[in-house]
Every structure is written in C-alpha cells, then in structure tokens.
Amino acid sequence: MHMNNIMELLDKDKCCGCEVCKSVCKPNAISLKSNDEGFLYPEIDDNICVKCGKCSLTCPVLNHTESKMQSDCYAGYIADKNILINSSSGGFFTALANNFLRIYPDDGYVVGVVWDTTYSNVYHFCSKDINDIAKMRGSKYIQSNKGNIYDEVLSKLESEFNVLFVGCPCEVVALKRYLKKDYERLIAVDLVCKGPTSARMWKDYKLCLEQKYKSSITSVNMRYIGWKEWIPQWINIKFSNGNEFKKIFYTTDFGRAFYLVQRKSCYSCNFRDKGRMSDITLGDFHGANTLKKYYNRLGTSIVIANSEKGKCTISNLLSKDTLLLPVNYEEIIKHNPCIIKSNLPNEKRGIFLKLYNDVNMHLAVKKTYPLKERLINYLPPDLSGKLYRLAQLFKGRKGKS
Ligand SMILES: Cc1cc2nc3c(=O)[nH]c(=O)nc-3n(C[C@H](O)[C@H](O)[C@H](O)COP(=O)(O)OP(=O)(O)OC[C@H]3O[C@@H](n4cnc5c(N)ncnc54)[C@H](O)[C@@H]3O)c2cc1C
C-alpha cells in the first residue's frame, strides 16, 4: 500500500528540523537542504522513495500529542564554582550528567551537543567519557546536526545501556517517536528554548571574525561571564594566534541574529508546556529573587520534573554537589514565558533577512539595530556591562509602572 511521504503532508513552515524523517528512511530517500535563512529542511528523492509512509508516521509535528505534566519546580546551582562559571545558567546539565555517570560508570551514556573541530557547526554526540561532559556544556545557539543520534540511542538502549539524552524540546519528542516505546533506562532532558538560529548565520559570522583576527577559532563560549555576573551574557572566542574576542552577546552581529531570527516553526512550537515529553526541563531562572538562597550571581537554573523518573533523578543528586530548592511554577513562568508559549516573530525579522541575503549580516544588523542601543558597543567592556545592566533595570521598572 502506498502511503504519503512527509513532504506531501507537512506544511514546510511547520517543520522543526528534528531530522527524524531522515533517520527513519531506510532507503535514504531523504536529504537535508538549507533554505535561504540557513535552516535545514528535508527533501525527498521521488526516484528512491518507496512510499512506505514511515517519515510521516514518525514526524513529531504531524503526530502531535500532549501529556499531563507533573511540574515540580526547583531553582538552584551546582556547588563547583569552576563548573558553574562555564555553564549556561546554574550548571544542572553537568550535575545531572556527572551523577548519571557516577551511578552507571560502565553502562551509562550521555548525549549532548558539541562543536565540530573547526567550530563551524554543532552536533548531537554520545559518550560515556566524563571528560566529554565539558565539551557538551554551554548553550550553542544554533540548530544541531542530528546525524544518526536517534539510531545510536536506540541501539544503546536495546543493548541494555542507560542513556541521558539532552536536547531541545522537539528533539526529545523526535527521539521518543523514533524509539516507539518507553525505556526505563532512558532519562530525557529538554531545555527551555526560544529556538535556535541557523548554522549558516554562525558560519558567516565566524568567517568574518577569522578574517579580522587572521586566525582560526579554537574555542567559543556563548554564555561567558564577562563581568562578575551571568547576566548580561557575553560571548568569548579564542583564536589560535592567542587573540581573544569578548563582547556582550546581544550587542554582537551574531547575538542580534539570534535575537531576531528563529526557525519559522519555533514561533508556533507545540513541544512546550503539555507538549513536552521529557523527564526533566532545564532553563535559566530569569527574574529570580536575588535575595533568595537558591540564587547565585554566577548562574541560576530552573529545574522542572515532568515525570516520576525525573523527580527520582533530581532527588538522587547529592546535596554536597548542588543547592536546589522548590519554587513556584507560576512565578517561574511569569519571568520566563517561553517555558509554555512561543515568542512572536520579531517585527524586524523580515527586513533583517532580506538585507542579510542581499548584502551581508553586518549591514543587516546595522540597519535594524537602533543607534542608542548600538552605542554600547563602543564603550570599554566593563562600562558597557554596567550600563547594559542599568538599562535592563530601567526597562523593567518602566514596564512595571
Ligand atoms: C537554542 C537554545 C535556546 C535556548 N533558549 C532559552 C530561553 O529562551 N530561555 C531559557 O531559560 N533557556 C534557554 N535555553 C537553555 C539555557 O541556555 C541553558 O541550556 C539551560 O539554562 C541549562 O543551563 P545549564 O547551566 O544546565 O547548561 P549547560 O551546562 O551549559 O548545558 C547546556 C546543555 O544544552 C545542550 N545544548 C547546547 N547547545 C545545544 C543546541 N544547540 N541544541 C540542543 N542542545 C544544546 C548541551 O548539550 C548541554 O546539555 C536555550 C538553549 C538553547 C540551546
């Protein structure tokens, strides 16, 4: 019987780029092609497609389901200061991963996202080596390449290994659909996610920096602590000739691209709130009460248990390694609404992309970035950090009045 393939059923703008259709297609009829925004979309070779329908039956967008979440919420941070300053918020990914490999030293695998060797792209990577956790640490704000990760996780689980998988909410749902059944040995962790920007934009930005510094990149940290506190986040890039680039993330061309451009499907993402299928959700605790014990100025995470397994995993964390306290779910959502709902597309998204495609990223940023906000770029780093934080405070006060 002939079944419809994914491209016959799925509105392209709704495709979340999870790549599970490609993974499930055994005849290899599906390849991924970049659109003019730099995001990857599946393309089907009709000469190879056997119309088995597996791609459309697995697609998480076409087969959306909702589950009842438990929503036990906590806030806190990892005790190890060195790990904390190198993490995106409170370091709970590392706390979970280290504890997992401590419990399963011989039969546990962690899956997270790492840079490739040239810092051009990021991909999901599976490892049992505790030294690889540091490479996974740190949010890389571009969409990852999934490669054959879903299949690798399946074969690990089938071989009775334990797996801790971390990814964006759509990637967790895609994994669950690929696996087709629940595995007690799998702990799925998703992130609070406003949506990644495209790898092509990062590549263009990287090329400009490498030309400017006449050297290749040797490390990237998009959540660098530039001035004693985790907010505002900075970007720190090191080069093989010893140069170092440090700037407030959202004032850089790439930071602006991430601010303005998400994948189209991210503006109507169905994998938040009740659409999540993870055991645990991790995010930044924006708007945290800085006087509370759970707050650390070097980074504070929110940790949400979505299942009994998630609750149990969190309760297994050693109290000497982490500080974690219960917090109110409504309070968290008030300051971080993208836990439950998508952002609207930025009104400058279209013009930014047009200028980016017609001219280049730098001009697109220049023309869409108001002068008064841009001036901050020209101040010495310490002063710009202080001013940025003052501006945010002022904005918050104005919003409240
Ligand atoms: C694209 C993206 C958008 C995000 N948007 C928000 C947001 O709007 N609000 C918010 O509160 N939090 C957001 N986060 C999550 C936040 O940045 C932190 O990852 C989270 O607070 C966990 O902090 P941590 O200290 O435990 O992270 P870390 O210890 O730094 O670990 C980060 C984890 O994220 C994984 N990861 C890194 N890059 C990617 C990627 N490209 N795709 C999938 N997984 C990745 C790593 O493998 C690691 O497991 C986003 C993350 C990403 C990747």
Image (cartoon, rainbow, N blue to C red):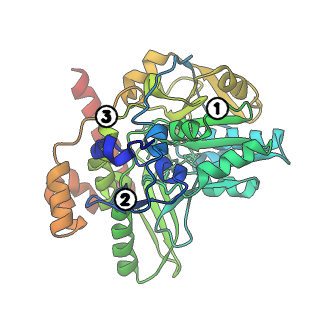
Which residue lies at the image location 60% right of the left edge and 35% below the top edge?
180
Against 50, residue 188 (above or below) is above
Q: How many neighbours does mark 2 have within 10 angstroms: few (below 14), some (14-19), or many (20 or more)?
A: few
Quadrant containing the C terminus in the rendered view: top left
Looking at the picture, how far across and down is residue 107, in whole percent? 82, 46
Residue 268: assigned label: 3
Q: Quadrant of residue 72?
A: top right
The CB of the residue at mark 3 lies under 8 Å from ligand 1: no
* Mark identifier at residue 108: none
- Per the image, label 1 sits on a secondary structure element best described as loop
Q: Earlier in the sequence, mark 3 or mark 2?
A: 2
Question: What's the residue at 20%, 57% (across, down)?
Answer: 353
Vertical relation: 322 (above or below) 3: above
Residue type at tag 1: Lys
| Image side of residue 328 versus residue 99, left or right | left
Please indicate, yes or no, whether residue 381 appears anywhere in the rendered image: yes
Q: Nearer the viewer, mark 1 or mark 2?
A: 2
Give the percent coordinates (x, y) of residue 70: 57, 16
1 or 3: tag closer to the N-terminus:
1
Number of numbered discs: 3
Give residue 253's quadrant in the image.
Answer: bottom left
Describe the element under mark 3 as helix, strand or loop.
Answer: helix
Q: Is residue 163 above or below residue 182?
A: below
The residue wearing badge 1 is: 181
- Which numbered mark, 1 or 3, is in the foreground of this view? 1
Which disc is residue 46 wearing? Answer: 2
Q: Earlier in the sequence, mark 1 or mark 2?
A: 2
Q: Nearer the viewer, mark 3 or mark 2?
A: 2
Q: Residue at x 34, y 61 (%)?
A: 34
- Image marks 3 and 2: residues in contact by CB distance under 8 Å: no
